[in-house]
Every structure is written in C-alpha cells, then in structure tokens.
Image (tube, coloured by chain):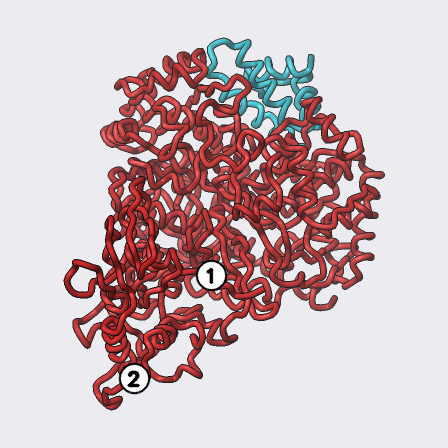
Chain colours: A red, B cyan
Amino acid sequence: MSLDKEKDFGTPARQSDQLVNLEIDGFQVTAPAGTSVLRAAASIGIDIPKLCATDSIEPFGSCRLCVVEVKGMRGMPASCTTPVAEGMVVTTQNKKLADVRRGVMELYISDHPLDCLTCAANGDCELQDMAGAVGLREVRYNPAGENHLGAVKDQSNPYFTFDPSKCIVCSRCVRACEETQGTFALTIDGRGFASKISPSQNQSFMDSECVSCGACVQACPTATLIEKSVIEHGTPEHAIVTTCAYCGVGCSFRAEMKGDQVVRMVPHKDGKANHGHSCVKGRFAFGYATHKDRITKPMIRKSIKDHWQEVSWEEAISYAASELKRIQAKYGRDSIGGITSSRCTNEETYLVQKLIRAGFGNNNVDTCARVCHSPTGYGLKQTFGESSGTQNFDSVMKADVIMVIGANPTDGHPVFGSQMKKRLRQGAKLIVVDPREIDLVKSPHVKASHHLKLRPGTNVALINALAHVVVTEGFIDEAFIEGRCDLESFNKWRRFIADERHAPEAAEAVTGVPASEIRAAARLYANAGNAAIYYGLGVTEHSQGSTTVIGIANIAMATGNLGREGVGVNPLRGQNNVQGSCDMGSFPHEFPGYRHVSDDATRKLFEQNWGVPLQGEPGLRIPNMFDAAGDGSFKGLYVEGEDIAQSDPDIQHVHHALESMECIIVQDLFLNETAKFAHVFLPGSSFLEKNGTFTNAERRISPVRKVMAPLAGYEDWQITQMLANAMGYPMNYSHPSEIMDEIARLTPTFTGVSYDKIDSLGSVQWPCNEAAPEGTPTMHEHQFMRDNGKGLFMLTEYIATHERTTRMFPLILTTGRILSQYNVGAQTRRTGNVAWHAEDRLEIHPHDAEDRGLKDGDWVGVKSRSGETVLRALITDRVQPGVVYTTFHFPESGANVITTDNSDWATNCPEYKVTAVQVTKVSQTSEWQQNYQAFSEEQLELLAKG
Amino acid sequence: MHIEKLIKMANDISDFFNSESDKELAAEGVKNHIKRSWDPRMKNQIIAYCQQDGKELSPLAQKAIQKLAS
C-alpha cells in the first residue's frame, strides 16, 4: 500500500471530436481541441511547473510559473490558458523559462514563512515542490520588508484552518468555491500587495456562507487551508479508495491513512458519482467511527429494566438465537422478523433477508426504505417496469430544464446539488416544486424560473395540473407514445387528465399555486428539448406518495423525456444504500431483483440455491410489525443498522410496540434509541471497518473497503452469518465477494457484477448482465423493463390526505433535513458538525409567529393529534404562512412524537410531510420529552452498570 | 392488529383504484394489491371483518375483499 497521489493534469479535460496534433519538447502529442498545452504536456509525462492551475477548476493564468515558449508566438504564454493548436511546437524547458520561473518563485517565497520542517504540509506542499522544481536556491529580498507573515490564522472551522500568512493568493480556493461547489463564499479582497482571501466580507469561515465542503482545502497548493486532522496527526502514508456512507450520492473517497488511523477522507477524482467533490459530511464527519460512545462488546439482558451484561460473542449469539427459537416455538413461525438498513452494504442486506426468509422461515423482513422511497419502488415498477431512477448524475449536464420536486439537493444530496448548480449556471432552466423556499430557488448565480410553492399534501393535484397542460396544449410526444408506451393505458389517461377538474385553474384552489404559474412551468418543462425531473422525500412521504411517483412517470412519458441523456425520472435517495437495500430483496414481498415472493419460478430458484422451502406470502412491513407487536402476534425482532425508535412516525406507538416484544436484537455502532428497548446488543462495524458494496441513487454499485480492523472484532455480515448458524441455518461465506457472486447468480440485473469487475471499472451501474456487460448509465433507451416493453400510464386521482387542519390544529408541519446533519444524527451528532446544527428548531413564518406572540428563539409547544413536543422557534419567511417546518436529527426533539400513522396507500410509507399542528409559546419541555429524558438516563445508567 | 387500521388501508387502496370506471377492473386492482402486499394475518383479519360486518369498508374495498376471500 502507498499513498499513490492522484495525478494533477493542471487543467480540466476537454471533450471534442476534433483531435489536435502538436509537438512538445520534441514529442508528438494528440489532444482533443480545447485542451490546454499544460494538460497535453502532462498527458505524456511532461510536468510543467504550476501553482495557480489544477485540473478540477478552469485555468486562471495568474502565477506565471507554467510559462512556455511556442514557436512563432511572441513572449512566453501561460501553458494553462493556451489551448493546443494543430502543428504547434512547444518548448517547456530552457534557460530563459527557468530564469522566469525562478524569479516568480523567489517573489512568492520572499513573503512566505520558511517553516517547512514544522509545517503541517511538509512533503505535501506544491509551493515546496515548485521551489525544488525550478531550482530556487536563494531569496534576495529583505525578509524584514513588508510582508504578510503576521496575518492571523482563522481556526473557526471545526475541520480546517486558514493561515493567510502562507497564502500565495493563487485564487484556487476562490475558484473551487465558485466552480466546484457553487457557493461563492470566498473572494479576493483588496488589490495588489493588499490582496487577500476573504470568506464572505472579511468574516471568519464559520461566520461566512462557507458550507465546509472542503473544495477549497482540496484545491489549496500550500498549508494555507489544511485539515486540522493533518495538523494533529501528520501527513498520511497510504490510501484506500472506498465509498461514503452518508447520502445517496455515494461519493468515492480516498481514505488517507496512517497505520489504521484515518487522517483524512479526500474525494476521489475518478469517482464517477462525485468527480472529486465532497460535502461536509463525507469529507470531514467520519470521527463517529472511533467515538468514545462506540460499543465494542456484545451485551445481553433479560429485560429492558435490567442492566446490560457484557458477554462473549458466542454467548450473545447463542442467547439471541435461543430467544428467537423460543419465541417461534411459543408464538409461531411468523412471530419474529428483522429490519435491515440503507446504511448496510448490499451484501449485509442480502444476508439479513436470506437469514429471515431461509433461517426464520418467513418473509417478515423490511428496510428503512419503507419510510422513505418505497413509493418510488412501487410507482416506477408499475409504470416503467423497474424500481429505480433512469439516469446517471452526469446526465444533468445535458438537461435544458430541471424540475426539482420535493427535494433539497444542496442540503440532502450536496455533491449532486453542486453539479446541478453548475448546469444551471450554464443556462439550464429550473422549476422548483416545494412548499418551502429551498436554497436552489435563489442562490448565487442560480434562480428558479418558477417556484411552485404548493400546500403540503397537494402534490398529486399539482402534477395532474402540469400534465393537463401537456395534454390540452398539444405537448404530447406522439411518436414516443406510439413507439414506446402501452396505447390503451395512454388513451385512458389522456381522457382522464384532460378533464377540467385537473386544469391549473381548478388546481389553484387546492394547491395554492397560481394557475398561470402552473401553466408557465408546464410549458417550460414540455418545451425543453431535454427536461429532467429530480425528486425526493417531499414526493414519497405522503399518503399519496406512490400516486405522485406515478404522476411524475406519466408526465415524463407523455413528453418523451425518457431513454436518453439529459432527461428522465430521478429519485434522489436519502441514505447511501437505499437503492441497494431495495435491490437486495429486503422488502417483505420481494426477492432480490424485485421479484415477488409468490412467483413460483423465482421462489423455486431461491429454494434450490438456499436449500430450504420458502414462503410464497408477503411478510409484515415495518408499521405492520409494530401493529402486530401491539396485538401480541409479533414478539422478536433483529434490527441491523436502523433506529426505528427515533426515525419512525408516531413514535409513542412505536415505543409501545417495542416494549411489547420479548426479544429485540440490535446490531449497531451505538446504544441508539432502539437499543434502549433491546435485550441483545451486537456491536456492529462502521463503513471503514468492512468490505462490501453500496448502490447509489444512479444504480451505481461502488466498493466499500476495509481501512481498519472492526473495533468489535467482526464485520456486520459475519455477525449475521454467526446468528444464522446459531439459528440452525448454515452460512459459510469467507468474504463478501462470495455473497456478491451469489447475488449475481440469482439476480438477472446483476449477473455481470463481481468484485473483479467493480475493481476494474471503479463502479458499475446495474443492470449489468450479458446485454450490458459494463452496466447501464441510462435506463429504458429502447424499451421499458415491463414484460411487454411498453411504458404504462396509470390514473392519478387527487385524494386529499386524512390529515386536515382545523381550528385546534391550524398549521401544517412538514419535516426535512439540513446539510450538516444526517437522518437520526447517530453519526453526525458525534462529530464536529454540531457546530452548524446543534438542535432541531421549528421554522415558522413571521405572520404565524406574530399571531402567537412569538419571538425568534422562543420555546414553542408543537401539538398534533399524535402528541406534543417543544422546540425553539426560528422565524423565517422560507416557510409560507400556515406551514411550519423542522428537522429530525436529535432524539430529544421528538419530531416523530408529532407525526401521525397516516401512510402511503400503496406502500405504507409514512406521511411525514403533512401533520396538522398547533404552535404555542411554552416555558418547559413537553411531558413526552420529560419522560424520554428520564427513560434515556435510566438506560444509560443500565449501560454504565454493565 | 387494529381492524380500524386495516379498514383505513383497504379504503385508501380502493381510493386509488376507484378512478377506474370499470369497477370490476378496479376491484381486481384492489384485490391484487392487497394479495401481493399484505401479510396473511392481515388478509385473514380483513376478510373476517368483511364477512361479519364490513360496513366501514368502501363499496369498492368490500367488493375487492370478497374477491380476495373467494
């Protein structure tokens, strides 16, 4: 293993059909038109000295170090800003050039602290490298002259420092913030010698708009911007490429190591989902993996009133298995089940569902996708024939119009959000459909053409209205319909949607969005050329979540926006492996590859391979498990990597269900909220401690590689295997690659997937099989995946949610996430990210706040039909009057005390996005919060006594 | 399980399929959806309710569950 630094070609690659031939230092080079001389030289191993250039950002031509001579051209042009030309003859090294470069370096070094030996970037500093490359041997300028050596260091960011005394004002950080991240938080303040990098308007990094993505740190050629972890631990000595365990973008990272310690996570330039970019979570928030709260010893207890007892792995596994068997013997085969998580690898999820179907003998397996994107699975399977998004992320760079529905990419999927903003800055138009003013609506150099600020719960009415305009104003792509879609269903849908009840003028009363805006947005989408839809949980987490997904599929088919780059229907998945966990058969009604358990041929295939008879009836979904626990027919639960006691709706009902069970086995990193109700705790491994794969929102299967030994001794798949064996169902895998081989053998869309292929390609998008041996970036190019190959239109009547506002509950609460925190916060709450978001707050419109006499920061009671909690108010017009909003990252906030048991008609995905509430000023926490605090403290004491 | 929840779920499913004008087809849709996504104990419970009482079920849900029972 070695650090094996990624090569920097100096300027970005260019795409062109036209190839240009030139000569550099006597060598013939061919490069696509538009390529810089600097990059062309680098491509044949000639590294021209440079400082202000790097291949992640556009050339700038300021440092004058990369100057070259070009035959027939006057002077010494900068090779970074000089494009290749046919027949060009370039000289990169001669005395004249060397003298110029030395002179430039001498000036730089004259105003730079000469503390290389104690500098944190020693050995990893481009300035140092260039001083060597140009042969700088002396600095003739008086060191006592005017300089910046006394500039004050900014240490405000929890993860990196900014030391202006070391800054060479190359502007790489400024450009990275603009071009790569799209935040425009940095600028060059002042002129000439007074020039300096300034976050916002001479603020500290923490007080500026900086989102701590790390792009500036990555771009900095010196120690000016450097990770605090490097300052603390020194430079890394080897690197392993792996995949981030946070959101569904699935960024590729180099875990840069010192022994078994992660020094830093650096976004991998070759990562096909992120192209070398990152966000504050993936880049910096990995410290949870070694947090003191990690539990590394197995524990058991008879009752949740007992203290935990540390035991050996053998005893813990044996106890867990005996309890599950006891419960089955007493209450029946179907009285136990399990829940996997999108935080688990594909291989782990596959094993859990295999354990349950084959080892438990039932289909009571579900995953947390139940509470996020299960309507995507249903809706897209019905219409397109496959439960997945249609594009890769890069497709957005060819979109002319982007419609974002119920998603907040800059917070929830930040790296893709940056890519989307890049396309918008290039001129693509944007339509935002969201009750709340997300950042994309208006941010530097990005402005939505239309923000359809609808009332929560009215998505279907709005989508129908958009489709009505498409149908009645002649925007149907008749050729696409004729060739690609089921005509009978289309004609029925066309008549249905053309009805006046779906007209924008009718929808205005329901959605609150002016009809003229709906019409204008529909015309923009339908006339785009390439129009792409991106959506998130604001679509799925509704009682009509599946209907909205179907409506989105209908409108994309109707306008022919499928089957090529730049278009499509793109669900933005919440967690890192939502797509994968669904693919792996973790829903109770489906085997891996979305094949129904009642399908005899599929079941027989798995029975033959797994060697046991399998059930042909669906099992319980997560909310059904809670209900069944309440009535006494469900008594044992194995939960891997999921915190249902915090994340699921109507949490008091969930807690009651958990208390009703006789054996709950939690496999996790921490004593999370669910573990407080558990009887067996099996310490799991973080993504840094195991091998496997994650599948991101673009169906990309990427490697997860072990960079340190599991703190508790086992990778999660090994723990599941031990439990299976103890249950009497033998499993004997020696490596997760063998699990993937089995998945490939049994799943038609995965037959071409193997660890060898993933390693050789870096990642692969399924379907990957004989028809597509290197994977499928764009789905449905020639036909849909349904049995007859035709896209199916379905009728999408708007049905109002059961959740209604009344005089007692006049406001609608909707929930979401914030950039710095992740889901239930178990990981990010244990990192420096709390510096940005240390509590969940309730956003409320100034009018609603005034009506209630609220000031910013006041404690407010939020009461629904399900329960009551107390949060601090944040008064903002980002929310519309009548709507309040909160995040759900802290258990003590009790956001899910308020949410109801309403759920999607097709999948039971909870309706997190619509809860009728009343908000009042209060002076103390709610009764639930007081009870929660007491329970939580009691459980922590029981842990401490163990 | 609470029968009220199952009734609500069945009615919600029926609401989606109710826009199909051919009610036989609509009932078939509801039946298939329940058949393919509900655990047997849930199916048995809603069938028992439909056969004994069924008043809280929408007409389409009743029709679908009768089909499911047959």
Q: Which chain letter matches label 1?
A: A
Q: Looking at the picture, how far across and down is residue A217, in whole percent?
A: 38, 66
> Circle 1 sits on which residue?
A266
Q: Looking at the picture, how far across and down is residue A684, in whole percent?
A: 67, 56
Give the position of the N terminus of chain A as an image quadrant: bottom right
Q: Looking at the picture, how far across and down is residue B2, in whole percent?
A: 65, 32
Image disc number at residue A843 = none
Residue A73 in sight here: yes
Q: Which residue is drawn at 33% across and 51% down?
A: A849
Q: Which residue is drawn at 50% across and 76% down?
A: A232
How many C-alpha atoms fall within 10 Å of the one at disc 1: few (<14), some, or many (≥20)? Answer: many
Q: Of residues A912 and A25, which is closer to you in this image?
A: A25
Against A154, residue A589 (above or below) is above
Q: Which residue is drawn at 81% across and 43% down?
A: A730
Residue A875 in sight here: no
The amino acid beneath tag 2 is Gly
Q: Which chain letter matches label 2?
A: A
The amino acid beneath tag 1 is Val
Give the SS element for disc 2.
loop
Distance from the alpha carbon under mark 1 to that under mark 2: 30 Å
Of all residues shown, which one is farthest toward the front?
Answer: A26
> Circle 2 sits on which residue?
A150
Q: Of residues A925 and A478, which is closer to you in this image?
A: A478
Dot 1 or dot 2, earlier in sequence: 2
- Looking at the image, residue A158 sits to the left or right of residue A99; the answer is right
Q: Of residues A945 and A228, which is closer to you in this image?
A: A228
How many C-alpha atoms fall within 10 Å of the one at disc 2: few (<14), some, or many (≥20)? Answer: few
Q: Looking at the picture, how far across and down is residue A432, in whole percent?
A: 32, 39
